[in-house]
Image: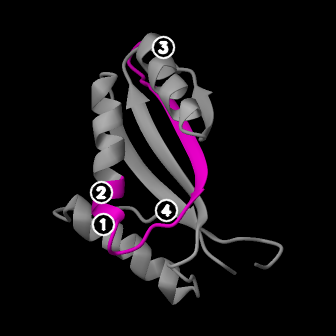
Amino acid sequence: MADEEAEFEILSEEGETPEEHDLEILDTLEEHGADLSEPREVRVDLLFATEEQAAAAEEELTELAYDVVGFEAAGEEEQWAIRATRDLQVDRANVTGFRHRFEELAARHGGEFDGWEAADDS
């Protein structure tokens, strides 16, 4: 890996399914030289209505060896956000299960999955 890693968070296009969006992220990583068979830093974003929900999800993710950072809601209408980071191997064979795992974790705690991003190998 070079000294600086490029990070990719691809914004989904209107009408694009989550699965198509995930494949677009993987395609972009490969276009920039990433070897999808190797683990890389992956960041997952989750949103919650309350601090308690966010804290419960943060605790579960920490137990699963993720580094977790919480972001306080900026106002009454804003959601609490957490970002979980860990080196993972994500590729076309496992990306659907990867997404579903985080959608289910967020739902268990009353929240929602807000996307993921990854660093490439450059």
Which coloring applies here?
one colour
Disc 1 marks which amino acid? His
Between disc 1 and disc 2, whose residue precedes?
Answer: 1
Eye-nearest disc, 2 or 4 = 2
Q: CA distance from mark 4 to mark 1?
A: 10 Å
Q: Disc 1 vs disc 2: Cβ atoms closer than 8 Å?
A: no
Q: Disc 2 vs disc 3: Cβ atoms closer than 8 Å?
A: no
Q: CA distance from mark 4 to mark 3?
A: 25 Å
**Residue drawn 48% across and 47% down?**
44
**Residue drawn 34% across and 22% down?**
109
Q: Which residue is mark 4?
A: 9
Q: Which residue is mark 1?
A: 21
Q: Position of residue 20 (x, y in %)?
A: 24, 70
As helix, strand or loop, the secondary structure at mark 1 comes to helix
Q: CA distance from mark 1 to mark 2?
A: 14 Å
Between disc 2 and disc 4, whose residue precedes?
Answer: 4
Magenta residues, start to end: 76-98
Q: Position of residue 55 (x, y in %)?
A: 51, 18
Q: Which residue is mark 3?
A: 51
